[in-house]
Amino acid sequence: MDERNAPAGDAETYRIERLLAPRNLTAVAGIGILLAGAATGFAYVGGWLSPSRLTPARIVDQFERTNGLHPGFRRNHPKGVCFSGWFESDGSGRELSRAKLFAPGRTPIFGRFAIANGQPALPDMPAVVHSMAVNFTQADGQFWRTGMNGIPVFPVPDVQDFTAQLAAATPDPKTGKPDPARMKAFLASHPASARAIAIIKATPLASAFANTSYNSLDAFVFVNADGRSTPVRWSMVAEDPFQAAPTPPPPGTKPAAKPAGDPNAQFTALLDRIHRGPIRWRLVATIGQPGDPTNDPSIAWPAGRRQVQLGVLSVNRLEDEADGACRDVTFDPLILPDGIRPSDDPILSARSAAYAQSFRRRAGEPAPVSAVRFPSSAGSVR
Ligand code: HEM
């Protein structure tokens, strides 16, 4: 019988009878095993089999416990604006990577500037960690996404410690504030973080988005046209002269200066700056040598490593997140074009999974109202 013409019930019987024929039983058993395997896989990914294992959902739950729930916002770096512009290469990067954007010419970019904390409406302080995330769209349709922070090393060596550090910074329900004793205990039991945080504290923060140099922190691997692999970390080095942010007062002391009257002072300064012309950064790759750790962004590579300038990033337009190209994008560090590969750093896949989880949650919530609003067309220069 032609199944397409059989009454629905017959077709079902026909399929079941055929499946129960002895020669097909092995196949049915195989399908059963596959389905059971898939179910176990889902349970594994969901973390149901091991309540203490860190899953993307548990990582993002921890952000929500530490920062509070802010529906519609990114679970980290929620206060930000979109930007766009271009990347210009002179071809110097081709010795390291065959990625098309390192051939001579221009590649369109968009991205996002943000403050690296978990609060979407916190008034801007004079000293903050600035972040820059960029999407490069190559002519062949491949993307490169990278998120960078304005600090020299990452404060933790792995995602377990990242989540433990967040937990230590979670406000005490009795006081509404983090308990300094918990952070002290975290640092005492995590010497790698204590070392990294000492480096971060000893490096002055830049005063503004425009004069911050941003670092990938994680290592990656560049692959050139001959198939040669090179471990790298990259930085966007600001062309605007560095100006140090005022040093924050030691914890527990009264701030000498109140936060600026403008709650969005960091973003107002960015808008003022772009009205004076495009803001530029040199994209520089630092080449790792054998023995330089590629799996731990909390350890700095020794000074004096060879650096190669890959091109210049120009930002000439700012947009509200509500309308900007960056809104529905995660700057997943594993979105890489041919010619750039992940390193052996396990933080990369943890970031990728956590960014996707954060996106899934915020995409299913009402659109947030960003604290930073620009009048339309306010942030565009040629
Ligand atoms: C285990 C470590 C990390 C975890 C769990 C984590 C988690 C997150 C999450 C959930 C977001 C929000 C994503 C979204 O909704 O789009 C985010 C944003 C961001 N992260 Fe991470 N992150 C980690 C490490 C890093 C590292 C090493 C860097 C390196 C510089 C970094 C840079 C950024 C930047 C720049 C953003 C903001 C992107 C934007 O403006 O949209 N993160 N992170």
Image (spheres, grey):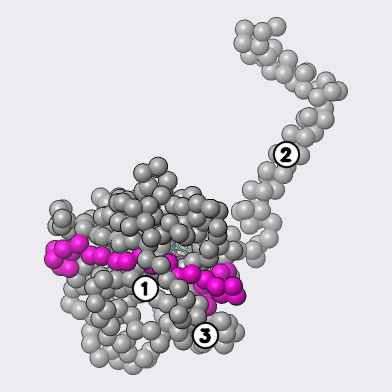
Secondary structure type for disc 3: helix
How busy is the neighbourhood of tag 2: few (under 14 within 10 Å), some, or many (20 plus)? Answer: few
Residue in view at x 34 percent, y 53 percent: 104
Q: Which residue range is magenta in the image?
A: 272-299
Residue carrying label 2:
34
Q: In which quarter of the image is residue 94?
A: bottom left
Residue behind label 3 places its C-beta within 8 angstroms of ligand 1:
no
Which residue type does callout 2 highlight? Leu
Measuring from the top left, give residue 382's x and y in whole percent.
15, 55
Instruction: Report the front residue among 332 and 34.
Output: 332
Q: In this view, does 26 lie above or below 362?
A: above
- Mark 2 and mark 3: Cα distance apart in space: 47 Å
Q: In which quarter of the image is residue 157?
A: bottom right
Please tell me whether residue 162 belongs to the stretch shown in magenta.
no
Visible residue check, residue 333: no
How busy is the neighbourhood of tag 3: few (under 14 within 10 Å), some, or many (20 plus)? Answer: some
Measuring from the top left, give residue 2's x and y in whole percent.
67, 8
Choose mark 2 or mark 3, whichever is in front: 3
Secondary structure type for disc 1: loop
Residue carrying label 3:
195
Choose mark 1 or mark 2, whichever is in front: 1
Which residue type does callout 1 highlight? Gly
**Quarter that holds the N terminus:** top right
Residue in view at x 33 percent, y 70 percent: 237
